Image (cartoon, grey):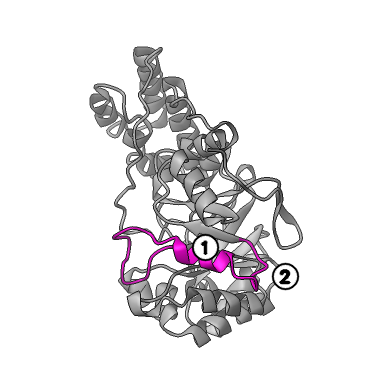
Amino acid sequence: MLAIFASVIKIGNDLTFNEFPLLLAPMEDVSDPPFRAVCRAFGADLGFSEFISSQSLVKGAIHARRKLDIFEAERPVGIQLYGGDEDSLALAAAIVEATNPSLLDINFGCPVKGVVGKGAGAGVLRDVGLMVRLTDACVRATTLPVTVKTRLGWDEGSKNIVEVAERLQDTGIRALTIHGRTRSQLYKGEADWSLIAAVKNNPRMQIPIFGNGDIDSAEKAVEYTNRYGVDGIMIGRAAIGYPWIFREIKHFRQTGMPAPAPTVEERVAVCRMHLSGALRFNGPIQGLNEMRGRYAHYLKGLPGIHEYTRRLVRLPDAGGVGELLQEIEAEYRGYVTEPEPIRLVDYHSNCSL
């Protein structure tokens, strides 16, 4: 079945999508510029930075400032902030604006204990009034479009997302992404999209509503699009090591047919592309280290590939990696990988919404 979708989706005055947009989720230790650029090349319409502590940014912490970096090839891109203090969040928003992203996003969904314990991320779900004040402070502090990502509520007894969405819209946000779980669920159980649909179908809502949670195939993306009527979908864990999911969703939505599995040449090309970006962004040593956990995902499905990936992670320089990738391409040239179900990566250190 082909998807039913609106022809134009707008976030603010300047960010327009001419078809159903696919968003790459902000994921800590994953969504850096090289990874975002790879996903953009394969069909992600909008990406987000790793989340940034507003207090760390205001204090000038190097690790926080570095997350503001953007590759031109990955635009449009949003910078995501989190924090539980109105003043620091407003100051951080002004700092973000100076780096000229496409939008500013506020994280009210990260369930990690270290964030929640500071009264930020999903911790704010326990105080809707504070959530509204924090959002309002951010909207007032910047001319950038401000968006929000959040969850259904704190726990099973407080799924108040319909009310929360109305109040956030009233502050002036330009879009809302909802992950279909409560904070108490973390990433367990199935995401409940029925309440996301309730927000979308609320006649008071005038901003785009994006759904997130458990999308791991093109077929499921189209099914959920038709069933719940969202304006777009955000994909997180399913894109780790498999950027082709964006292309596959668009192909299935347009044709009703599954897209061909990525070729060996494409898999190797993505390794090269990501490595090049990692070296440029992180430098020769850190960039090479950053890639060591990526090869196995990108080359998954090739018989006997484990021996090659074991060698890849031990190589001390990019030249050696390039030569071995060339060897892999020659060895497997013509091999057709069978489409496999995408398994959501159990990646607890991130705050993928």
Residue assigned mark 1: 197
In the drawing, does residue 154 fall left or right of residue 249? left
Q: What residue type is labelled 2?
A: Thr
- Picture coordinates of residue 28, whole percent (x, y): 41, 58
Magenta segment range?
179-208
Magenta segment includes 200: yes
- The image shows a total of numbered marks equal to 2
Label 2 sits on residue:
143
Q: In the picture shown, does residue 318 fall above or below 36? A: above
Could you say where residue 202 lies in the image, as x and y percent from the top left? 59, 70
Residue 175 colored magenta?
Answer: no
For the question of whether residue 64 can be seen, the reply is: no
- Residue pushed farthest right? 13
Q: Can residue 126 be seen in this view?
A: yes
From what the image shows, is residue 328 above or below residue 20? above
Does 197 sit above or below residue 86? above
**Residue toward you, 74 or 258:** 258
The quadrant in which residue 213 appears is: bottom left
Name the chief secondary structure element in magenta: loop
Measured Cα–Cα span from mark 1 to mark 2 = 29 Å
Number of other residues with Cα within 10 Å of mark 2, as a class: few under 14, some 14 to 19, many 20 or more: few
Q: In this view, does 324 lie to the left or right of 151?
A: left
Tell me residue 255's x, y (percent): 57, 31
Across and down, in percent, residue 178 comes to 49, 64
Q: What element carries label 1?
A: helix
Which-is-in-front pick, marks 1 and 2? Answer: 1
Residue at (32% x, 60% y) in the render: 187
Mark 1: few/some/many CA within 10 Å (<14, 14-19, 20+)? many
Look at label 1 and name its amino acid: Ala
Q: Which residue is drawn at 42% across and 25% down?
A: 322
Residue in the image at 59% along x and 77% along y: 166
